[in-house]
Image (spheres, helix red, strand yellow):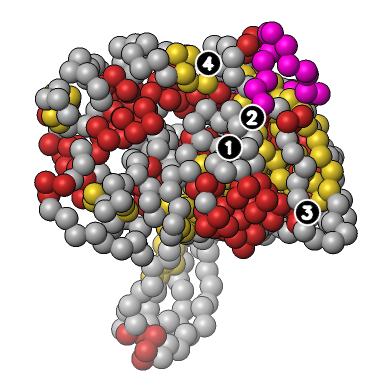
Amino acid sequence: MSSIKIGYYRYVAQGIVTTSLSLTLMSCLSSVSAPSDGAATGTVAKASLSSAQRNSPATPTPSSSPVNQAPSSPVSVSCPTDPAASSALNACTITAASPADSDGNAVTYADAGSTCAAVVVDASSGSATFTAPAKGSTCVVQVKANDGSLDSASTSSATITGANRAPNSPASVSCTIRPVGLSTGNTCSVAANSTLDPDGDSVTYLDDSSTCAATTVDASTGAVTYTAPSKGSSCVVRVKANDGALSSTGTSSSTITALGEATIRALPAPSANNSVPSTNNCAGTPALTITEAGFTYSTECKAIDVSCAGVQYDATAVLLIYTPTSEAVKGTVILGTGGGGTSLYEQGFVPPEHARDNLVVGLLQDGFRVVQRAWYSGGANRLNWTHPVTGFNSNGWVVGPGGMKNLACRYATLARKVYDTYHKPTNSDKPFCISGNSGGSTEVSYAMATYGAGEYVDMALPTGGPPMARLDYACMGPQRTLTGGTVVGSSSYLTKLQEQAYLSLLPSSFVRGTAGSLQVLDLYPGVPFVPTTPSTYQDTRYYLANHSMGWAVYDGAYQDGVNACYLQTHTPTVNPAMEATWYQDSILSSDAVLSYPNTDMRFLIGANEVGLEVPFSNLYYQSITSDRKAKAVVAGANHEIGNTAAGATAVKEAIIQNCKKYH
């Protein structure tokens, strides 16, 4: 049996008292005995221990460790306080405490009950993104730190308020893009954005630094009026939306480029400086024969002065205008003759009765306003030119210098001025249509392909042409030996591919007819085939050049005795450098507009047509990319389509049936 001894000892040495206690423990303890000095005595009760207690190992006492502290809150959360209402991914940054955690633990960051929508907190950096509240509403972003077990208190951003957003830009601004130069009251329409304002605010419309003069914008509708720039110059209209506080980005129109400048005035009496031949003088026009009982109409005879950029001389034309007065106007039609266009339509064909009594009267009695144009020749306007080789007199609109394309601006300006003055003010809901024969078809075609007439013309009807579709093909074709052995042209002027294109357009499309004329064969169906042999094919270029002096009528556009087309086809001295000039001056030049979605394009050719007008009419027809187009042959008619009753009737019926409103 072990024992527990408890001793109490007291030592005194050198003035130091030391006390010690001695214990002897026994499993069966009955008493504790002190030393014999009697300093301490006592009796300890006997303790009883269980077997488990006696045999269990001793349990060590754990050592003390420090308690984990929560990380520090971020010092600040910096967010935009007035972001655009409902805008997403607005960014906030935090300033972290230093140290971030007093225990040195790594921390991450998390959202701590933010009231803004779509709050995302980057765990590493604490930066956040959020979606702003609606306009005028508020929210806050709150961020906390975490050390893996404990969160800090949250830190809140300043109050965030959804700010007003700018309205959406107008969807489009659609203007008259080829107005008469310096004309006033030209219009644009504004298509509103499908969502006017992202906050649901009402909007008004304002000008946004338009470059066109006198631009005014209707605040409610956005409708615009403006003054066109000077001839050949350009500008744009620009419109923006405004919600009372903020404006949208402006929306621009297409570039607006002015045609020529034009003035309609009273027709002067003929004078030495302003000669007016009988064929374009309204005073010499006989009264119309009206067959419809009770039908009445008014007659106006005006002069129109036209000047165009790139053209040296101004031009003047007569306008003879018939307007129904006993019934509502059904639409407006402009009619033009060929060559230089110096004759009124009702006087320019032989005999004139078919064009006057059938076509003009027929359109008038059907309800159309009929406008005829005839360009002055000679006099102060200098609209004439004598060919240096042939002596042929060119006059009217084809006299330059300037070139065919620039000179065609004269007619395009005239047509637009007639539309603006006589049709648009009271008949804008009715169709506006144009037609011309031969040189007149060239005017019509240039107006469509070069001068933007497709924006207001509902139907265009070139007849007997246009002969100017590809001037390069006509004036610089492959080598030919003409009558008398004269060699014209050279294969070096055109590549083989170009030469083949020329040949495919010309000789294979014509055949020598029994009546001595070239008849349409395959370009226009419905014309009878006349069997022949290759030896009877006419040299088409030579024939065209000699037929009515051919292209000499148009050489006045260039007033050049060296490079003129007639000389190109009649002498061995030619200028190959003119090829590019002829092409770019053609109706089908590289910059031609060939889609007219709101215009019905129709072509009429006489079955006895003898000229280049046939393949070139077909080439223009084929080149048009819009769907609303048609071509037809008029049996019994020749190049001057109004010379015959069949031709005049075909033109009249084509207009009555197809001059419809498409704009």
What's the mark number on residue 384? 4
Residue 419, picture quadrant: top right
- The residue nearer to you, when weighing 227 against 41, is 227
- Residue lying at 32% horizontally and 23% vertically, measured from the top left: 565
Residue 77 x/y as whole percent: 64, 42
Q: CA distance from mark 1 to mark 2?
A: 7 Å
Q: Which residue is mark 3?
A: 290
Label 2 is placed on what type of residue? Thr
Are the residues at dot 1 and dot 3 in contact (C-beta closer than 8 Å)? Answer: no
Q: CA distance from mark 2 to mark 3?
A: 22 Å
**Secondary structure of residue under mark 3:** loop
Position of 80 relative to 257 (above/below): below
Label 4 is placed on what type of residue? Asn
Residue 588 x/y as whole percent: 39, 38
**Secondary structure of residue under mark 1:** loop
Q: Is residue 288 visible?
A: yes
Position of 77 relative to 312 (above/below): below
- The residue nearer to you, when weighing 16 against 204, is 204
Q: Quadrant of the N terminus?
A: bottom left
User: Magenta part mainly helix, strand or loop?
Assistant: loop
Q: CA distance from mark 4 to mark 1?
A: 18 Å
Q: Which residue is mark 2?
A: 279
**Secondary structure of residue under mark 4:** strand
Query: Few, some or many C-alpha atoms within 10 Å of disc 4 (few <14, some 14-19, many ≥20)?
Result: many
Q: Which residue is mark 1?
A: 348
Residue furthest toward the bottom? Answer: 51
Which of the two marks, 3 or 4, is nearer to us in this view?
A: 3
Please provide the residue range marked out in magenta: 259-278
